Amino acid sequence: MSLANGRPYLAIPGPSVMPEEVLRAMHRAAPNIYEGDLIEMTAGLIPDLRYVARSQGHVAIYIANGHGAWEAALANVIAPGERVLVPATGRFGHGWAEVAEGQGIAVEMLDFGKRTPVDLNRLEAALRADKTHKIKGILATHVDTSTSVRNDIAGMRAVLDAVGHPALLMADCIASLACDRFEMDTWGVDVMVAGSQKGLMVPPGLSFVFFSDKAADARRRMERVSRYWDWTNRADPQMFYQYFGGTAPTHHLFGLRAALDLIKTEGIEAIWTRHETLARAIWAACETWGQTGPLELNIADADLRSRAVTALRIGAPHGSALRQWVQDNAGVTLGIGLGMAEPGDPAWHGFFRIGHMGHVNAHMILGALGAIESGLIALDIPHGPGGMAAAARVIAGR
Ligand SMILES: *Cc1c(COP(=O)(O)O)cnc(C)c1O
């Protein structure tokens, strides 16, 4: 007998749960890539992607995961030998920096550790120190999925403007897009990268690079950009194949169409509010459980937390034991701790994450939390009473 039999919930921070509408849209025979539905549908994706990004700017689509979008974004605006500034707040900030290094870009690192957001004063000092404007781009992570910290992207724009520094503001919104409020144009973001498999609710395999006119100018000044990563034709195709630099990602596009329909129907503001409320329910439960015992939210200040993912510390071996228990006994798969300790280090087993991005609602979150509370009880992990009731009060609006 297993109480896990039934519909599983993959509560990891990407890939996220796929709506039935997305799955159904993808379940079809191979379409013609020269005429018909696919061709007619694709152009219409662009304004809807802009709607999600809150941007009137340009967008290029890549058949790639988020790592591909990182590389694509850099390839268009930062030449080998040029410099970027990377304010890192977790594993993903370091990841983008490593991709830059691989492209021969000089990386200046500002490391803010694993539990705090970017300190804008330190960012300002680094930019002021760059008197000759060697720094061409700031690689900022909006939500670092490993730590679940949420950074102040608008604040970074304000710092750039106050210093009068011309560097491009480049934001990684792979975890946050369509989960946490993000306003590309209002916040003055020049380049933004996103992936299909998180807030956009589509399988991994598509990624997006949004860019401003200022970034488009920077691209035009590049001596050369590798043909495949070049965003010029992708964002302004004269022929259909140019959207994708080759064969279209046919089924992903039908899935994306269905996902964007869901997003437009719900409305981006309502989506942000739903994520906000569900996140608060999770935090209420976790804070209550943490009143006694080892459970702790990785980011102490709620204002600095992501609404898409929550990173937790619980001490080894409880993190791994709890993940295993809820998977085997309740059909909920929680995320591993990422970048908190080295794999192989016993401390690695002391972390887990809850993904709450995209196609999630109150019953899914309450179910995941109920499974966690059951696991805490079953494994004799000390915890404060009343976590589920605290979450239920948030959902009830009391
Ligand atoms: C998931 C994620 C990535 C990496 O995306 P992949 O599709 O795994 O390459 C990068 N940055 C952030 C913030 C992410 O959440």
Image: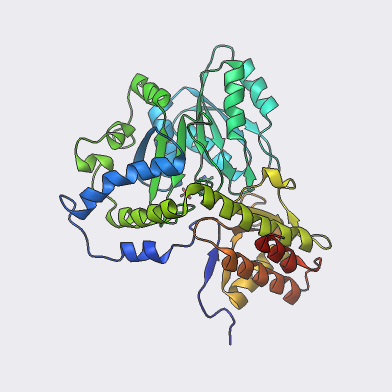
314 displayed left or right of 8: right
The answer to which image quadrant residue 377 occupies is: bottom right
Outermost residue toward the right? 292
Outermost residue toward the left? 35
Above or below, 99 relative to 338: above
Residue 28 appears in the rendering: yes
Q: Position of residue 317 (x, y in %)?
A: 72, 64
Residue 345 appears in the rendering: no
Q: Position of residue 398 (x, y in %)?
A: 72, 60
331 displayed left or right of 266: right
Closest to the observer: 384 or 128? 384
The answer to which image quadrant residue 318 occupies is: bottom right
216 displayed left or right of 324: left
Above or below, 159 relative to 203: above
The answer to which image quadrant residue 202 occupies is: bottom left
Residue at x-position 67% and y-position 51%? 341
Outermost residue toward the top? 132
Q: Position of residue 274 (x, y in %)?
A: 57, 55
Residue at x-position 64% and y-position 44%? 149
Which quarter of the rendered picture does the N terminus lie within? bottom right
Q: Position of residue 54 (x, y in %)?
A: 46, 38
